[in-house]
């Protein structure tokens, strides 16, 4: 911010103080104004924008502390600095309680005054920046930013909208790549915790011992290599939202520790004794069948019930084909801009191919397929040759309604995908080669 | 031989008259003599030259010693101004500062001094700079090194707070002169309309304690110098 843009108002009944302070700040390049009493000051504050107000405690008509209250009513972000001829602890405490930035006694040391104003300006800039950033955060994640046209996704968004302002634990379920984290971020961004951190933890990507340290942090010397104290994700999420991605992969021991923390909102760092209080909301996501995992004994039932308070299920992309065209168009636009390519859309043939694809990797796969196509296509339209996918017949055909028909179609699809490499196809299908051979023979796939 | 001697005598006489003429012009410019002091013969010989010099005289800066300031300090300031800004200066008789003394603070009010300096601005002077060794203040601050009229004609600067002895350090005349010169240029800059400069090396950078004056140079940065030069060019 330029100094000329910073307005300093001096309110003092002594002309010599007003003039000397005005001159001092004018030489520094600030925009300066002065008022000789409370009424004059209030008029000036209504007329223009002031960032810092120097206020004499003793003013004719109205006490400086009272005037400060009025100023804060006009604009709570104005920085007020109280000046007085006689230092008094009472008035100092009173004015600071009412929100004064500082309190100075006349005469002021020039070096102190310079630092005081520099700090006040910095404080004012940070306040303005903070307001702007909060506005940006509010605008950043709106529900209409999720691209969808299907009624299934509209239902998902409706549920997310409903649960976002509450503090309820949310479990988001759905296949890999459907956008579970995006929905979790939307829930956070539309909650009252949006100005606090959103802390995602990928529970599936770490060894148990590391995950424990990741969650709870550790004290210096807690284990070999713990050279410094480290805050865990639970601590970092204080005030905000903790997103447990792939929560189905958390080990039984960590589930127990996490359950205790979720219940009590208290924990200790690894190797530490100090109890740390935290306040966060939990949103978790999984693509696993947790009910089955409970039966298998790999997932704690109590932990499941603690998490499964409000469930949102995101259907896979193949079940909501209406979302494919708007999503595809969105990704084309996004990647064309980022790669600076002149691609304006998708050809009808390519779009048809996209609609007919099975999309086992869901929206993530669609995004990656479009990204690759944008790389190789010179433009102006994305062609079907650019797409790294193969067409699988959709289940429109009545033959595919039986389990055998689906199995046949799927084996056919995998064989085509693996260039008829039997070993690779058997590995993908998780059956042995002999079984695959017998099924190929049975369905006449060779 | 006598012919050569005669020529040398003529040359000597010519040079001495030339030197006398220059001194006379300078004294008249400084108002230490007036044309009435000249003999009729001098007037006849030099009147034309003197008249031309007076008429073509450029505006100058008046330096006023406030209370007592050593002559050598003032002369060094004169030289510094002449070197940096190529402006003529004039040192006036000292001014007693009793009128600006504030007994409650035991300091001298620099704003009151500025007002008096403006009242005694000599004819032909476009700036008046007061130099002193007393402690200056403005009502809201504990002290000031100097004060100037922003875009005006008067400035005052004090060496009182610049002296190392005040801070328990050994006296350093050279350092004191450097600090005084820098603050004099700083206040002079304000009279040309310059505000504080963000360039740490520029003399217009604000200094709120003595050691901070040492950090900057005694010259204007390119943009501040350009500003001052453009104003001086119009004079």
Image (tube, rainbow, N blue to C red):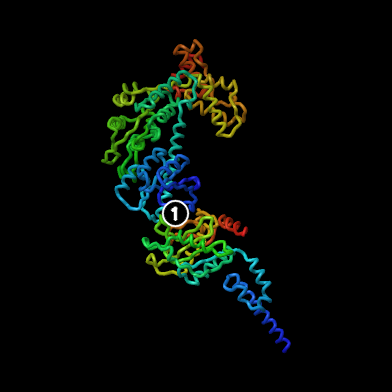
Q: Is mark 1 on a helix, strand or loop?
A: helix
Nearer to me, B210 or B23 = B23
Q: Residue at x 58, y 22 (%)?
A: A350
| Residue B140 picture quarter | bottom left
- Residue drawn at x 43%, y 26% as measured from the top left: A176
- Location of residue A173 with respect to B189 vertically, above or below: above
Disc 1 target residue: A20
Q: Dividing the picture into quarters, in which one does residue A280 lie?
A: top left
Q: In this view, does A353 lie to the left or right of B97?
A: right
| Residue B71 or residue A181, whichever sits in front | B71
In the image, residue A202 above or below residue A297: below
Q: Which quadrant of the rendered structure holds the N terminus of chain B? A: bottom right
Measuring from the top left, give residue B108's x and y in whole percent.
Answer: 42, 62
Residue lying at the far top in this picture: please name it: A398
* Residue A446 visible in image: no
Left or right? Give the position of B122 relative to A361: right
Q: Which chain carries label 1?
A: A
Q: Which residue lies furthest to the right in this view?
A: B3
* Residue A265 visible, this angle: yes
Q: Which residue is drawn at 59% across and 31% down?
A: A376
Residue B2 pos. (x, y %): 72, 89
Q: How crowded is mark 1: few (under 14 residues within 10 Å), some or many (20 or more)?
A: some
Number of callouts: 1
- Residues B152 and B38: in front is B38
Q: Return the x and y of residue A86 as percentages of the image width and height.
A: 33, 53
Q: In which quarter of the image is the C terminus of chain B?
A: bottom right
Quadrant of the image occupied by residue A123: top left
**From what the image shows, is residue A291 above or below residue A245?**
above
Q: Is residue A227 left or right of residue A181?
A: left
Up the image or down, B196 lies above or below A312; here it is: below
């Amino acid at each position: 911010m330029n100094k000329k843009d910073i307005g300093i108002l001096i309110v003092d009944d002594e002309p010599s103080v007003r003039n000397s302070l005005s001159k001092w700040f004018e030489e520094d390049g600030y925009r300066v104004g002065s008022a000789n009493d409370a009424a004059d000051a209030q008029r000036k504050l209504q007329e223009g924008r002031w960032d810092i107000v120097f206020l004499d405690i003793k003013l004719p008509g109205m006490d400086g502390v009272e005037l400060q209250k009025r100023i804060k009513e006009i604009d709570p972000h104005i920085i007020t600095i109280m000046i007085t001829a006689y230092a008094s602890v009472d008035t100092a405490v009173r004015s600071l309680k009412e929100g004064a930035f500082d309190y100075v006694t006349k005469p002021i040391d020039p070096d102190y005054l310079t630092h005081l104003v520099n700090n006040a300006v910095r404080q004012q800039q940070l306040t303005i920046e903070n307001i702007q950033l909060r506005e940006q955060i509010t605008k950043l994640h709106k529900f209409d930013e999720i691209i969808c046209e299907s009624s299934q996704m509209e239902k998902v968004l409706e549920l997310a909208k409903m649960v976002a302002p509450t503090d309820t634990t949310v479990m988001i379920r759905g296949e890999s790549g459907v956008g579970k984290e995006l929905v979790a971020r939307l829930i956070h961004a539309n909650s009252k915790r949006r100005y606090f951190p959103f802390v995602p933890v990928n529970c599936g990507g770490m060894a148990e011992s590391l995950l424990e340290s990741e969650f709870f942090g550790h004290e210096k010397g807690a284990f070999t290599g713990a050279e410094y104290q480290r805050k865990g994700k639970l601590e970092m999420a204080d005030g905000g939202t903790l997103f447990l991605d792939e929560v189905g992969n958390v080990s039984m021991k960590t589930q127990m520790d996490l359950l205790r923390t979720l219940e009590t909102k208290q924990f200790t760092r690894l190797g530490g004794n100090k109890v740390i209080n935290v306040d966060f909301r939990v949103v978790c996501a999984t693509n696993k069948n947790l009910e089955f995992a409970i039966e298998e004994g790999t997932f704690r039932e109590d932990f499941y019930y603690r998490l499964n308070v409000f469930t949102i299920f995101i259907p896979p992309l193949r079940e909501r084909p209406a979302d494919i065209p708007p999503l595809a168009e969105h990704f084309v636009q996004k990647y064309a801009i980022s790669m600076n390519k002149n691609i304006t859309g998708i050809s009808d043939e390519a779009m048809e191919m996209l609609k007919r694809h099975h999309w086992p990797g869901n929206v993530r796969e669609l995004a990656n397929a479009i990204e690759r196509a944008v790389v190789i296509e010179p433009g102006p339209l994305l062609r079907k040759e650019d797409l790294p996918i193969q067409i699988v017949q959709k289940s429109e055909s009545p033959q595919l309604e039986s389990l055998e028909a689906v199995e046949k179609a799927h084996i056919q699809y995998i064989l085509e995908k693996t260039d008829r490499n039997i070993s690779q196809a058997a590995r993908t299908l998780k059956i042995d080669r002999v079984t695959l051979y017998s099924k190929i023979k049975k369905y006449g796939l060779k | 031989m006598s012919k050569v001697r005669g020529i040398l005598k003529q040359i000597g006489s010519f040079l001495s008259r030339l030197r006398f003429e220059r001194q006379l012009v300078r004294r008249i410019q400084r108002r230490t003599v007036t044309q009435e002091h000249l003999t009729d013969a001098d007037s006849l010989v030099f009147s034309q030259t003197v008249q031309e010099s007076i008429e073509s005289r450029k505006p100058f800066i008046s330096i006023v010693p406030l209370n007592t300031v050593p002559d050598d300090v003032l002369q060094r300031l004169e030289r510094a101004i002449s070197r940096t800004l190529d402006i003529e200066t004039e040192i006036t008789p000292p001014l007693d500062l009793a009128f600006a003394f504030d007994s409650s603070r035991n300091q001298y009010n620099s704003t009151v001094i500025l007002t008096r300096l403006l009242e005694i601005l000599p004819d032909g002077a476009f700036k008046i700079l007061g130099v002193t060794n007393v402690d200056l203040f403005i009502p809201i601050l504990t002290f000031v090194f100097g004060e100037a009229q922003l875009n005006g004609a008067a400035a005052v600067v004090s060496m009182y707070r610049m002296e190392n002895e005040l801070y328990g350090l050994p006296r350093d005349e050279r350092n004191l002169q450097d600090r005084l010169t820098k603050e004099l240029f700083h206040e002079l800059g304000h009279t040309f309309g310059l505000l504080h400069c963000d360039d740490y090396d520029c003399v217009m950078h604000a200094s709120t304690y003595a050691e901070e004056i040492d950090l900057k140079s005694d010259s204007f940065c390119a943009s501040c110098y350009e500003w001052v030069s453009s104003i001086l060019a119009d004079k």
